[in-house]
Amino acid sequence: MKKDAYDVIVVGAGNAAMSAALSAREQGARVLVLERAPRAKRGGNSSFTAGGFRFVFHGVEDIKKIVPDLTPEEIACTDFGDYTAEQYLDDLGRITQYHIDPDLAEILVRNSTPTVQWLREKGIRLVPNYGRQAFKHEGRFKFFGGFIIGAVGGGRGLIDGQFAAAEKLGIDIRYDAQATSLLRGSSGVDGVRVFAHGVEEEIRARAVVLACGGFEANREWRTKYLGPGWDMAKVRGTRYNTGDGIRMALDIGAQSYGQWSGCHSVSWERYANDFGDTDLTKSGQRNCYQFSIMINAEGQRFLDEGADFRNYTYAKYGRVVMQQPGGYAWQVFDAQGAPFLRDEYKLRGATKVQANTLEELADRMRDVHPANFVATVRDYNASIKRDVPFNPNVKDGRCTVGLAMPKSNWANPIEVPPFEAYSVGTGITFTFGGLKIDTTGHVLDTADTPLPGLYAAGELVGGLYYFNYPGSAGLMSGAVFGRISGREAATAALAK
Ligand SMILES: Cc1cc2nc3c(=O)[nH]c(=O)nc-3n(C[C@H](O)[C@H](O)[C@H](O)COP(=O)(O)OP(=O)(O)OC[C@H]3O[C@@H](n4cnc5c(N)ncnc54)[C@H](O)[C@@H]3O)c2cc1C
C-alpha cells in the first residue's frame, strides 16, 4: 500500500464510523473504512438496534420534515408532542446524575436535528416508532419518553443505507480487517496496523477516526472494570467490540474518561445466547416490565417497575437484576397485562411459565420462594390506588401506597388468570467508559491536549453516560460526533 494512500482511515463500521466516513468524504477526503467483522456481520451494535434517534423537535411540522410521507390519517390520530433542547439537556443531566460532560451534551443536543436531517439526505429513510414508543389509547397514539423516529428496517436498514451511500461516494471498505495499533510519525498519528486474513500490514493515512465501539464483548475487561458477575452477562449485540480502539489510543497516551465501571444493561432473556442475533425472531428483549411486577428468588419485588417511562429506566435495570440472589428475576403478568407484551415475549426462546393460580405459577417457576411470592402479589394488589385511571402513554400516577418498594405508575393488579412469568437475567448493551474527546472529536491526552491526527466517535467516547442512559441517545450521539470527527479529521488531513 502506497504511503498516504488515504487521507482518513475510519476504524469500525457501525453508525458512528459510517457517519464519520460519509462526513470525511463530503470534505473531499479519500477514505478507508476498516471493519473487523466479515461483510455479513458488518455494522456493529448499530445493526442490532431498532434504529431509533433521540432529537429535538417541535410538533408535527418538524416531524413532517423528516418523515415527509406521513399520511393524513397518521397525523390525525397521533399526538407527537415536542422535545425541546432544554428537555433533552434536562434528561441527559437527570439520567446521568449530572455527571455528563456539559460540552459534549450541548454538542449532542444542538446538532441532533440537523444531523438527522443530514442522514436523511444521505438516503436513510425514517418512520415514527408506533407500538414501541406510543400506545393506542382511547383511539389515539401519544408518543412518550423523548424519541419517536426510527430508521426503516431498524438498525439493519440504517447500516445498509449508510453502506450504500458510502459505496456510491467511493469510500473504500475492507472487511475482516482488525485494527490492532496506531502508527505515529513526525506529525502525529499517521496510520494503523491491521490484522487481516492472517496477515499483519500497515496502512498509512493523514488522520484516523476511531469508532470501533466499547468493550462490552470483552468478558475479561467486563469483569475487570464493571466488576464481579459481569463475566456472566449476555452481550445483546456484536461480538467484535472488545475495546481495541480504546486500548490502541491509551497505548499512545490518550486519556481515559467517563464511567469505566458503568454500562448500559437491561433485563434480558435469562438463557439467551452469549452474543446478540440480528434476526429479531431470536430477540431476548424484555422491556414491557412496567406492566409487570418483577420478583427475585426470594419472592420479593426489588425495583419500581413504573418509576418512569421505560426509555429512562431500562438501561439501569440490568444491573439491578444482576444484583439479585442468583442474578435472575421473573417478570409476572396477568391477563390484563399480557396484551401489552411485545412480539419478542412470544418467541420460542422465551423462558416462560403460565398457570391459572398464583400457587401453581410459583410451583412452575421452581426457583422462587413460593409463599413469599404469593404474599408479595397479595400485598401489591391490596396497595394499588385503583381509583386512578390507567393510561400507558402518560405517567398516570396509578401507584401503590404503603409498600416498602413502591410502583409509581401503571400499577395494575395481578389478579386475572391466566398468569404468566418470564425469567430474565442481564443483557449488556454497551460500556460507558472510554476516551476523552474535545468538541471537535479530537482525542485528548492526559494533559487535555489534542493528539495530532487522532479523532473518535461513538461508544468508545467516555463522558456522555453515567449510571443510566436515555433511550436512543446512542445512535444520535454516534451520528453527531461521527459527523463532526469525520469532518474535522478530513479538514486536518487535507491541510497537511
Ligand atoms: C439490541 C440493541 C438495541 C439497541 N437499540 C438502540 C436504538 O434503537 N437506538 C439507539 O440510539 N441505540 C440503540 N442501541 C445502542 C447502540 O447500538 C449504540 O449506542 C450504537 O450502535 C453505537 O454505535 P457505534 O458506531 O459506536 O458502535 P458499533 O455500532 O458497535 O460499531 C463498532 C464497529 O467497530 C468494529 N470494530 C470493533 N473492533 C474493531 C477493530 N479492532 N478493527 C476494526 N473494526 C472494529 C465492529 O465490528 C463494528 O463495526 C442498541 C443496542 C443493542 C445491542
Image: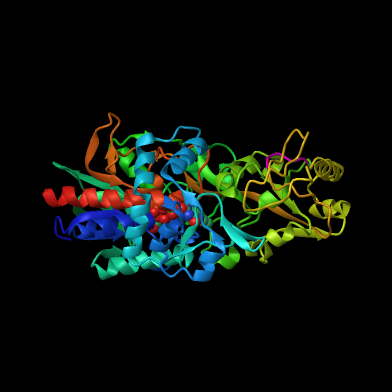
Which one is nearer the viewer's eye here, 226 or 393? 393
Q: Is residue 187 above or below residue 48?
A: above
Which one is nearer the viewer's eye here, 309 or 136? 136
In the image as oriented, which residue stretches furthest toward the left?
Answer: 496
State the extent of the magenta-drawn residues as a range.
300-304
Horizontal and vertical percent for residue 26?
Answer: 22, 59
Horizontal and vertical percent for residue 258?
Answer: 42, 35
- 419 on left or right of 273: right
Q: Quadrant of residue 342?
A: bottom right
Residue at the image position 51 percent from the left and 42 percent from the top: 263
Q: Is residue 82 above or below residue 163?
A: above
Q: Is residue 109 magenta?
A: no
- 487 on left or right of 240: left
Q: Is residue 301 magenta?
A: yes
Which one is nearer the viewer's eye here, 366 or 150? 150
Viewport quadrant of the N terminus: bottom left
